[in-house]
Amino acid sequence: MVIENCSNTYTEVLEALNCLNKEDFNKIPKEYIMYLKEHANKQYIFKYDKTKKLEEQNLTRDAKLILFFFFEEFGATKEQKEKIDRFKQNILKKEELEKQEKYNYNNLFKKGNIQNKQLNNHEINNKIYSKKNCLIVANKINIFHKILNYIKKFLKRKP
């Protein structure tokens, strides 16, 4: 299944690359093209519509990533590469900020952390007070029952 999906992705990439002009196509090393041709699914038929933009094509996510890699490595100008690098850095900064907010050690043990916000008060009360979540169940026997049990044990003894 995974190999078939990769083969289908390679077929989509090849079909998209065939729509490039010769100059841009020749920028991609032949080793990459040969690898794609060797591992492409021959039975899978994909038609690239030249009238649509790349975003509108019915390409898999992996095919789009491979095409983006080819563009970034072999087709982008210096300015475009700088813009791509800034874009990647912004994404990494956003992800890092989200991680810092989520795992901030000052907020880990506060009452209103993310996990508690997801539960409403009723669910919290049920979780705390349900017997299923108790670790130890204490059997409290009052003094009357203790005396009664002692008398029963005494009477059951055989002389």
Image (cartoon, rainbow, N blue to C red):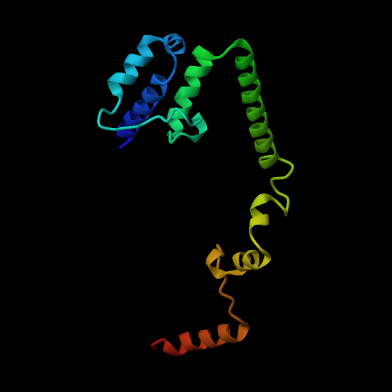
Query: Against 52, is 123 above or below?
Result: below
In this view, the residue in front, 29 or 158, is: 29
In this view, the residue in front, 10 or 135, is: 10
Image coordinates of residue 57 in percent, x first then y, are 46, 34
Q: Quadrant of residue 89?
A: top right
Residue drawn at point x = 69 percent, y = 34 percent: 97
Q: Quadrant of the C terminus?
A: bottom left
In this view, the residue in front, 41 or 24, is: 24
Q: For this view, does 44 lie left or right of residue 121?
A: left
Residue drawn at point x = 43 percent, y = 33 percent: 59
Furthest residue to the bottom?
155
Q: For this view, does 43 lie left or right of residue 142?
A: left
Furthest residue to the front?
51
In this view, the residue in front, 80 or 87, is: 80
Image coordinates of residue 94 in percent, x first then y, are 67, 33
Q: How many marks?
A: 0
Query: Against 12, is 142 above or below?
Result: below
Residue drawn at point x = 37 percent, y = 30 percent: 9
Image coordinates of residue 79 in percent, x first then y, are 64, 13
Image coordinates of residue 20 in percent, x first then y, are 44, 18
Residue drawn at point x = 60 percent, y = 65 percent: 127
Q: Quadrant of the N terminus?
A: top left
Q: Quadrant of residue 122?
A: bottom right
